[in-house]
Image (cartoon, helix red, strand yellow):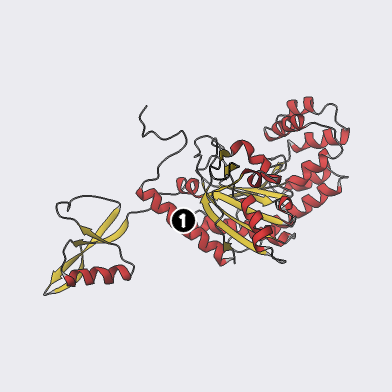
């Protein structure tokens, strides 16, 4: 095997795609800044106990681990940025009121989380700390949709909503070990009614019937009314359904969101151990799974001594680029290579004005790169001028 072969699910990013990724990164961060989100940059490497404490335990199998050569302590390469942002909110900012924070940086996974995915996503995310109301949930969804719109994705976007409180309420008082719980979750996610019946045969009737009903509770807004009838008698479920209905109605009333398809899948348990309330996925044409994932995770800061409300979302910028059309080559100005002071001054002025000026090195005039030189710098009557090619 060649020494230059990269590990599985790890890849170099070449110029045109790299430019697209960088331009999107800036657009996403600018969109978040427009909402009042402040940029933070957590380190890629942290002590393992910090990364994998509290809700971060779910990331254990996805986290690369190593030993710090300075201290001898176990370290981890982050697999998700949210626990780090929760630590920043709790210990470094420690604000009494609302904190709106965003980030964009690489994370590393020991294995891809879906077929054909990279193990080195470029994770962009935005999070609100300190507000428990639906206003924060709504803002998070609106920002996520605006980010996709800024990237050029509007047609065919589907917002899928669920709530972790529903399944938690149905499991209340049910004696079951973690392995059994994982099997029930898998059966619900696969909507495998026969497997679910087998796994829950010894459950109390209310829990068994409620979980069985969840398998069919997916689709449009009518699902919420069906769920209210099928899962009646549980206050926590009623509150979750009411919040989902209000959240969906609020989204449909916002200009720019009207007409977007909003669906519900009350058996969707991805991130069950992580989310404490509303959770969502946003689907776009060309993506095999949800491109954006988010929701409410109020317990995320508890391990850092600050258990306050939190809601947010994240996406992989590299995956986002994969569902967008390639961007055209960047327009540029071609210039000859020379030490002439007048030419150097003209090039400097053009670059200061934001233009890309590519100086053609001697003997390389016909080479092609990722810039489209549609103009050239030529000398006319002792002056350097730009003219169309």
Identify the secondary structure beneath mark 1. helix
Q: In this orientation, does residue 261 appear?
A: no
**Screen quadrant of the C terminus:** bottom left
- Residue 31 position, x and y percent, is 53, 62
Number of numbered discs on residues: 1
Seen from the viewer's position, the closer of residues 219 and 389 is 389
- Residue 328 position, x and y percent, is 35, 54
In the image, farthest residue toward the left: 381
Q: Is residue 36 above or below residue 214?
A: below
Q: Is residue 107 above or below residue 90?
A: above
- Residue 344 position, x and y percent, is 21, 69
Seen from the viewer's position, the closer of residues 147 and 216 is 147
| Quarter of the view holding residue 71 | top right
Q: Which residue is mark 1?
A: 24
Is residue 314 left or right of 298 when viewed as pictured?
Answer: left
Q: Is residue 229 above or below residue 28?
A: above
Name which residue lies at 39% across and 48% down.
17
Name which residue lies at 56% across and 54% down.
42
């Amino acid at each position: 095997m060649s020494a230059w072969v990269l590990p599985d699910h790890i890849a170099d990013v070449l110029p045109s795609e790299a430019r697209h990724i960088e331009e999107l990164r800036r657009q996403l961060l600018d969109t978040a800044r427009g909402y009042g989100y402040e940029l933070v940059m957590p380190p890629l490497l942290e002590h393992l106990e910090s990364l994998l404490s509290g809700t971060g335990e779910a990331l254990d199998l996805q986290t690369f681990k190593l030993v710090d050569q300075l201290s001898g302590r176990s370290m981890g390469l982050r697999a998700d940025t949210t626990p780090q942002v929760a630590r920043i909110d709790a210990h470094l900012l420690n604000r009494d009121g609302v904190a709106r924070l965003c980030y964009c940086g690489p994370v590393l996974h020991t294995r891809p989380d879906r077929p054909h995915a990279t193990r080195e996503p470029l994770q962009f995310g935005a999070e609100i700390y300190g507000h428990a109301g639906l206003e924060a949930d709504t803002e998070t969804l609106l920002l996520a949709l605006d980010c996709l719109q800024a990237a050029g994705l509007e047609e065919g976007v589907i917002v899928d909503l669920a709530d972790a409180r529903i399944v938690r309420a149905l499991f209340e008082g049910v004696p079951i070990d973690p392995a059994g719980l994982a099997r029930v979750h898998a059966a619900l996610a696969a909507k495998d009614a026969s497997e679910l019946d087998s796994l829950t045969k010894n459950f109390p009737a209310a829990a068994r019937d409620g979980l069985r009903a969840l398998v069919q509770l997916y689709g449009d807004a009518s699902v919420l009314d069906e769920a209210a009838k099928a899962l009646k008698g549980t206050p926590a479920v009623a509150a979750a359904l009411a919040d989902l209905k209000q959240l969906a109605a609020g989204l449909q009333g916002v200009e720019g969101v009207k007409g977007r398809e909003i669906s519900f899948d009350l058996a969707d348990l991805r991130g069950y151990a992580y989310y404490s309330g509303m959770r969502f996925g946003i689907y776009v044409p060309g993506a095999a799974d949800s491109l954006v994932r988010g929701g409410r995770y109020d317990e995320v800061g508890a391990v850092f001594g600050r258990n306050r409300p939190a809601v947010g979302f994240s996406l992989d910028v590299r995956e986002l680029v994969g569902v967008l059309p390639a961007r055209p080559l960047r327009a540029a100005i071609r210039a000859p290579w020379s030490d002439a002071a007048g030419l150097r001054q003209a090039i400097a002025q053009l670059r200061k004005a934001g233009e890309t000026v590519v100086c053609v090195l001697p003997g390389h005039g016909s080479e092609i790169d990722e810039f489209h030189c549609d103009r050239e710098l030529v000398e006319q009557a002792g002056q350097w001028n730009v003219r169309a090619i």
